[in-house]
Image (cartoon, rainbow, N blue to C red):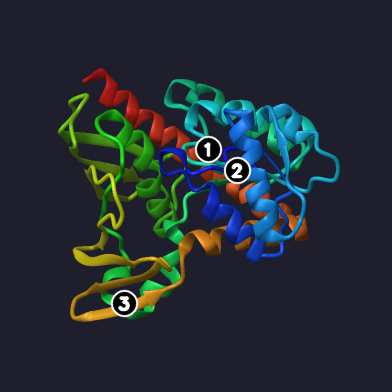
């Protein structure tokens, strides 16, 4: 795993826990500081009962003998180096979102093509869709087609533009899970508030135009540095508030007079990745590549519109 620590609220420790639960041994890690990486490797070795190597950089990490997969959980600027190292080593990858930094998004299609040419699975860590199958039976009135409106409130730890960079993939992945999104899907009518560099609140509304249909999307971001961080999802006007009970991170949703405890979507995504790697799932490899390609295209259009003012 590249980026196994918890700096800036990273997901490395959670990913390691879920991978180990899924029967996947995390046998090597790399980070920005080799000394701290070595300390963390020793902690992980004691915790999980097997050796964990500390590597100085993404390339040496990918070259550890016997690897079956590679996880990119580092901050966004390190994603490209990690992905390139895994690709060169022929390893399937679970990567934190966004796949590449916004200024590198023009490189996403070529990167996806090269992963596809080697038939390597590449999954972007967008776990929100994993809860939809549990929510839909409890709130059928929200999920009955057609999808007309989709809203998501999140509480990132960053401020300003970084809130959008960190959170936008979640909304787009939910859209993809609910309706087909392809090359014919376009973004229009973008409306913003809170675009200041130090802003701790940002609202974005836009329309995803699809053949014969359109969906209004809204992303509400409020900076919340510490847990628990509020979040809610609204589908066709039915709002479902998410609560997370610490310290075990038990998750539930409530709305319209009903509530439901759900499994951790990150755990579900990690388990699914592990299963696909074991099964060499070619169909999922193609499906994930297509999804990332369309999500990156829409992501790039929105972030560019933000930056152009």
Q: Mark 1 points at which residue?
A: 293
Q: Position of residue 209 (x, y in %)?
A: 31, 43
Q: What residue sits 46% from the left and 39% below the top?
A: 7
Q: How crowded is mark 1: few (under 14 residues within 10 Å), some or many (20 or more)?
A: many
Q: Between residue 65 and residue 105, name the one nearer to us.
A: 65
Mark yes or no: residue 144 visible: no
Location of residue 201 in the rendering, given as x and y in whole percent from the top left corner: 17, 39
- In the image: residue 50, left or right of residue 126: right
Contact between labelled residues 2 and 1, with CB atoms less than 8 Å apart: yes
Answer above or below: position of 262 versus 154: below
Q: Give the secondary structure at mark 2.
A: helix
Q: In which quarter of the image is the C terminus?
A: top left
Asked whether 188 or 30 is in front, the reply is 30
Mark 1 falls on what kind of element?
Answer: helix
Q: Alpha-carbon distance for marks 3 and 1?
A: 30 Å
Residue at image location 53% in from the left, 62% down from the top: 267
Which residue bears the numbered disc 3? 140
Residue lying at the far right in this picture: please name it: 65
Would you say residue 286 is visible in this rendering? yes
- Which residue is denoted by mark 2 in the rendering? 289
Tags 2 and 3 touching, CB below 8 Å: no
Quadrant where the N terminus is found in the figure: top right
């Amino acid at each position: 795993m590249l980026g196994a620590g918890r700096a800036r609220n990273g997901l490395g420790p959670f990913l390691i826990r879920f991978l180990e639960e899924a029967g996947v041994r995390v046998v090597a890690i790399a980070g920005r500081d080799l000394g701290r990486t070595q300390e963390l490797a020793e902690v992980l070795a004691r915790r999980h009962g097997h050796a964990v190597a500390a590597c100085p950089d993404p390339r040496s990490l990918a070259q550890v003998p016997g690897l079956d997969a590679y996880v990119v959980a580092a901050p966004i600027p390190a994603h490209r180096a990690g992905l390139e190292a895994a690709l060169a080593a022929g390893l399937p990858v679970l990567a934190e979102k966004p796949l590449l930094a916004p200024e590198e998004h023009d490189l996403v299609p070529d990167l996806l093509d090269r992963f596809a040419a080697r038939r390597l699975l590449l999954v972007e860590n967008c776990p929100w869709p994993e809860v939809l199958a549990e929510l839909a039976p409890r709130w059928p009135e929200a999920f009955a087609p057609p999808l007309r409106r989709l809203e998501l409130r999140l509480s990132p730890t960053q401020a300003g533009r970084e809130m959008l960079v960190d959170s936008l993939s979640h909304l787009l992945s939910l859209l993809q899970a609910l309706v087909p999104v392809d090359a014919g899907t376009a973004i229009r009518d973008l409306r913003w508030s809170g675009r200041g560099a130090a802003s701790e609140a940002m609202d974005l509304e836009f329309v995803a135009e699809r053949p014969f249909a359109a969906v209004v999307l809204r992303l509400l971001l409020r900076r919340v540095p510490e847990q628990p961080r509020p979040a809610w999802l609204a589908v066709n006007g039915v709002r479902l508030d998410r609560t997370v009970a610490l310290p075990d991170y038990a998750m539930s949703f409530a709305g319209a007079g009903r509530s439901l405890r759900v499994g951790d979507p990150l755990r579900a995504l990690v388990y699914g990745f592990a299963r696909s790697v074991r099964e060499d799932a070619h169909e999922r490899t193609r499906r994930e590549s297509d999804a990332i390609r369309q999500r990156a295209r829409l992501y790039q259009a929105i972030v560019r519109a933000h930056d152009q003012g």
